[in-house]
Image (cartoon, rainbow, N blue to C red):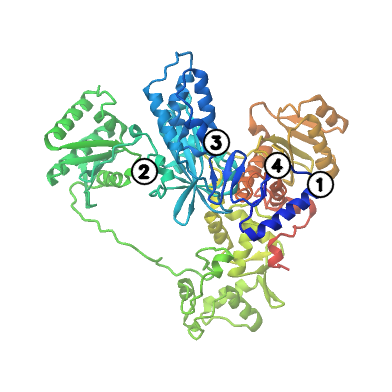
């Protein structure tokens, strides 16, 4: 049932179910005393008009009345009639592919105070639009949970997009969007226009983006551009805005629908770079100059991928730019000797590339001489030549050849074979993790165990004394220690027996389980294999998890009472494989500095307070107040729609004073809520010292800023499945912060506050007691 204000639509997949659905609808209406107008009701139809559109079994169709109103409209004779035409077009925008480009001549007539002239261009655009509306597309309805695909296209005047779904191999449109570019937007670079097209689609189609995974189909490196740490300004702002949604970036494939005909060209023709033809040879060049000498590296690739590599050592002193020119000239001479007629050169030197493309003037006498020599060599020996500037990371092969020539002796003629070493030369020690990949339980259940396969690590660790074991038996690192404790079994090797006896002194067997004494005198349950995977999954990303790093994850698991020998390595590997941690992890660009500690004499004596926001609306809430205790690192936070001085006062009373007692000091920034007379009088009443950090210097309240960063990072990692519900996740984030060990104290805030560790979700499935 669909309801919009006073319009209701009851729809059913099967005719037999429709009567039951109507009965439920009437029962609810009778329950609330609502009445329907019989003259406006229609029953038992296979299609009908709803909210101005025609809803059928095929999908959503444009209203024929709206189409007729445009098709039958004569050519406008003044601006008012043009406005009437654009209003009618706007009502059908969701059905019109690239509507802004099609309607651009009409919009140009309405701009400024120009005289009205309905020319041939406007008439052609009108006829083309009317022809398009004679067979409008049928919009499809997406199924719950399916992936939707977004195709975008940009021109010099507009950005457009279409959201489609795949139905049995056919691509069906869901919604068309389009936006004209204003003066500043029309001057954006091409990639920024593509990013703007995605942002426009996300804003217009927000319900679809929130409830579905969106795959952006593009041949351009949009993911790299939007996730680059060097981005700033509007691109960084757009990247943050799009991070709310589950968006994937995929390479374009062949289109399968007429609905995408207008999106075959993603970029305008003038923005498409010229690619080398099939007869072009690719020439990668690089020059290197250092105190050890100068060299040039050349990599020539044929159209059929045959590769010629050469490196030259320059026997004269040269600058780095001169070495780049020598590399280009040597590469052209090599291509000439092979008989190549068309060359596409790639260089990471901006100077050489821009000199060859005449974007820079060669004012230096030596650079000008190199330029003239190179041009003469090209004109006399090649039919076609193009040079492109590429990043150094894409020119690594030629760079390696140039470095080899720089560091090599020119008199030494040698061939360097390249071979591989498949395995380490040493045997891995006993207890090395055999968990090459940490998988979810659903993935593990789908893999059949191979009884004839023995892990290579196990083969290296165990001696011939294990040959009598069945290969199907899985080797457990606990067995050796348990057998020694229970039965006194030791290896035959004297030194191995001594190591086992020394190691077993830290273990104890009770109730059929093996425990290890920690340095603090606490018994840790020894676990293995599937139990390890379950514990790490629940602790890292479960209800009480906070996607912590490998070292913190291992420390947290130890605090929960679990142990295995390779837990530090396994936890680090697990954190590195976590997609959310890699996607939302902080990018630290500033150099490290010594920490300036702020001490506190006793728990809950000194609190750091701050406000962050605005965040996307979640139950009308956009801001968060956060306080952190300097001694225990305990965090309290609460979300608000807007924050005033009275809200701060109530928060301190409820979450600080009533829970943890009167503090000695509160440190805050110079926000208007903190410096208000209301809050200052409140602190004076309870004799709380209110200190304010230095204005425009966030490091002055570093404890609060660090907590803000941790909360925001954790919310990002949790919101993949619950977009726009960060207020509901805030309590879970606070729990994870309170139960995670801090490096500064090596204890959890919970244990420092209550003297005991909290019962964690991981202990529900695996009891450590």
Give the number of the mark in front: 1 or 3.
3
Contact, CB < 8 Å: mark 2 with mark 3? Answer: no
Q: Nearer the viewer, residue 519 or 444?
A: 444
In this rendering, would 678 be left or right of 149? right
Give the number of the mark in front: 3 or 4.
4
Marks 3 and 4 sit apart, C-alpha to C-alpha, by: 21 Å
Circle 2 packing at 10 Å, graded few (<14), some (14-19), many (20+), is: few
Give the number of the mark in front: 2 or 4.
4
Residue 69, image x, y percentages:
52, 31
Marks 1 and 3 sit apart, C-alpha to C-alpha, by: 35 Å
Residue labelled with disc 1: 32
Q: Quadrant of residue 639?
A: top right
- Give the SS element for disc 4: helix
- Indicate whether 136 appears above or below 454: above
Residue labelled with disc 4: 39
Residue labelled with disc 3: 65
Circle 1 packing at 10 Å, graded few (<14), some (14-19), many (20+), is: few
- Residue drawn at x 25%, y 39% is 345
Residue labelled with disc 2: 393
């Amino acid at each position: 049932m669909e309801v919009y204000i006073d319009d209701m639509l009851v729809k059913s997949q099967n005719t037999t179910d429709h009567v039951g659905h109507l009965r439920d609808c009437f029962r609810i209406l009778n329950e609330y005393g609502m009445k329907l107008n019989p003259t406006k009701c229609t029953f038992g139809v296979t299609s009908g008009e709803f909210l101005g559109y025609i809803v059928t079994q095929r999908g959503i169709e444009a209203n024929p009345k709206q189409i007729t109103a445009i098709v039958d409209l004569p050519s406008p004779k003044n601006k008012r009639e043009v406005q009437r035409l654009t209003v009618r077009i706007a009502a059908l925008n969701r059905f019109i592919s690239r509507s802004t480009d099609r309607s651009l001549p009409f919009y140009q007539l309405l701009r400024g105070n120009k005289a009205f002239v309905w020319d041939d261009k406007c008439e052609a655009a009108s006829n083309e639009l009317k022809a398009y509306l004679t067979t409008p597309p049928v919009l499809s309805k997406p199924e719950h949970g399916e992936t939707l695909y977004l195709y975008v296209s940009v021109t010099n005047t507009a950005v457009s997009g279409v959201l489609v779904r795949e139905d049995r191999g056919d691509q069906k449109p869901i919604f068309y969007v389009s936006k004209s570019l204003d003066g500043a937007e029309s001057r954006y670079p091409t990639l920024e226009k593509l990013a703007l097209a995605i942002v426009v689609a996300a804003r217009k189609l927000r319900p679809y983006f929130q409830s579905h995974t969106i795959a952006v189909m593009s041949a351009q490196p949009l993911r790299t551009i939007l996730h680059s740490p060097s981005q700033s300004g509007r691109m960084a702002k757009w990247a943050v805005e799009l991070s709310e949604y589950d968006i994937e970036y995929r390479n374009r494939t062949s289109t399968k629908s007429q609905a995408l005909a207008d999106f075959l060209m993603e970029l305008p023709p003038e923005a498409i770079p010229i690619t080398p033809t099939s007869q072009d040879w690719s020439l990668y060049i690089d020059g290197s100059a250092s105190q050890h000498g100068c060299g040039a590296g050349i990599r020539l690739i044929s159209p059929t991928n045959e590769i010629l590599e050469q490196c030259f050592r320059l026997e004269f002193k040269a600058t780095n730019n001169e070495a780049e020119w020598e590399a280009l000239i040597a590469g052209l001479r090599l291509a000439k000797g092979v008989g190549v007629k068309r060359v596409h050169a790639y260089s990471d030197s901006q100077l050489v590339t821009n000199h060859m493309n005449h974007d820079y003037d060669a004012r230096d006498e030596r650079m000008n001489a190199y330029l003239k020599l190179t041009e003469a060599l090209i004109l006399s020996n090649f039919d076609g030549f193009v040079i492109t500037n590429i990043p150094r990371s894409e020119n690594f092969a030629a760079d390696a050849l140039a470095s080899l020539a720089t560091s090599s002796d020119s008199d030494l003629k040698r061939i360097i074979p390249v071979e591989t070493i498949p395995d380490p030369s040493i045997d891995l020690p006993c207890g090395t993790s055999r968990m090459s990949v940490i998988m979810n339980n659903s993935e593990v259940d789908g893999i059949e165990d191979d009884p004839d396969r023995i892990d290579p690590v196990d083969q290296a660790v165990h001696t011939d004394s294990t040959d009598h074991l069945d290969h199907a038996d899985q080797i457990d690192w606990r067995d050796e220690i348990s057998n020694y404790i229970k039965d006194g079994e030791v290896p035959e090797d004297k030194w191995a027996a001594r190591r086992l006896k020394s190691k077993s002194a830290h273990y104890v067997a009770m109730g059929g389980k093996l425990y290890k004494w920690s340095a603090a005198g606490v018994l840790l349950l020894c676990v293995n294999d599937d139990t390890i995977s379950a514990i790490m999954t629940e602790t890292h990303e479960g209800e009480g998890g906070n996607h912590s790093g490998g070292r913190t994850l291992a420390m947290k698991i130890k605090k929960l009472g679990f142990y295995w020998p390779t837990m530090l390595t396994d936890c680090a590997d697990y954190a590195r494989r976590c997609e959310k941690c890699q996607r939302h992890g902080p990018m630290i660009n500033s150099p490290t500095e010594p920490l300036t500690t702020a001490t506190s004499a006793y728990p809950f004596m000194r609190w750091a307070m701050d406000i962050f926001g605005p965040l996307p609306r979640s139950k009308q809430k956009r801001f968060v107040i956060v306080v952190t205790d300097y001694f225990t690192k305990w965090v309290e936070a609460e979300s608000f729609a807007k924050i005033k001085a009275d809200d701060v006062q109530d928060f301190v009373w409820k979450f600080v004073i009533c829970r943890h007692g009167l503090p000695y000091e509160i440190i805050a920034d110079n926000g208007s809520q903190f410096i208000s007379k209301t809050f200052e009088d409140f602190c004076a009443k309870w004799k709380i010292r209110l200190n304010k950090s230095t204005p425009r210097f966030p490091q002055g309240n570093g404890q609060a800023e660090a907590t803000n960063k941790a909360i925001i990072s954790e919310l990002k990692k949790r919101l993949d499945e619950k977009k726009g519900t960060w207020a509901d996740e805030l309590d879970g984030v606070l729990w994870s912060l309170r139960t995670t060990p801090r490096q500064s104290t090596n204890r959890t805030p919970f244990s420092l506050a209550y003297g005991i560790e909290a019962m964690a979700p991981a202990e529900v499935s695996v009891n450590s007691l």
